[in-house]
Amino acid sequence: MKALESILAWVQENNPDLYNRYCMAKHEEEHGAHFDKAFATKAVAEMYHTAPDGSKRYGERWTIDEVKAAVEPFRGRMHDKDNYWDAYVAVHMWWHDLGRNYKQRDPNNYEAALIEDAVTWAFCDEDAPDGKIWHYIQSMK
């Protein structure tokens, strides 16, 4: 075990991208294609979009508790294995990628539609594989 730890420490220092891919593969092998707090917060922290003023906006827009409350009405439509950390990632990905479009169409009520569409896309796709948001985020790296 010490040899493996030593090798992984070297990889982490010298090739962080490879180390991250290893960690994600190990997580998926042990826990399935679903986010936990550590992977979800890292994924969201790396997300960004360019605001109308030209500045880049990174990371979290809603806390996990806010996401839980927002997606609770849709929980019955989600697969049993889908969890709130998956939803946290999906909602933030949708906000960073499409939030401006939603806000332009309905400035006063865009967040509800954005959240519903994010949940529908990520979790209510009958022909998608288990862990759709996990696989999608990995494909973006």
Image: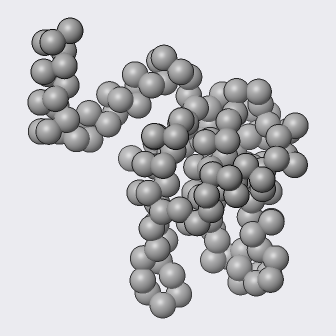
Q: Residue furthest top?
A: 1
Q: How is the image coloured?
A: one colour
Relative to 140, 118 lies left or right:
right
124 or 36: nearer the viewer: 36
Q: Residue furthest bottom?
A: 53
Q: Is residue 5 above or below residue 129?
A: above
99 or 3: nearer the viewer: 3
Q: Residue furthest front?
A: 65
Residue 117 position by quadrant: bottom right
Q: Residue at x 54, y 35 (%)?
A: 36
Residue 70 visible within the image: yes
Relative to 102, 47 lies left or right:
left
Q: Residue at x 75, y 69 (%)?
A: 111
Counting the numbered discs, the total is 0
- Residue 47 % position (x, y): 46, 60
- Residue 83 % position (x, y): 68, 36
Q: Quadrant of the N terminus?
A: top left
Residue 66 position by quadrant: bottom right
Q: Is residue 124 above or below residue 108?
A: above
Q: Residue at x 48, y 49 (%)?
A: 41
- Residue 64 % position (x, y): 63, 51
Q: Is residue 47 above or below residue 36?
A: below
- Residue 127 % position (x, y): 75, 32
Q: Residue at x 67, y 76 (%)?
A: 101
42 or 100: nearer the viewer: 42
Residue 90 visible within the image: no
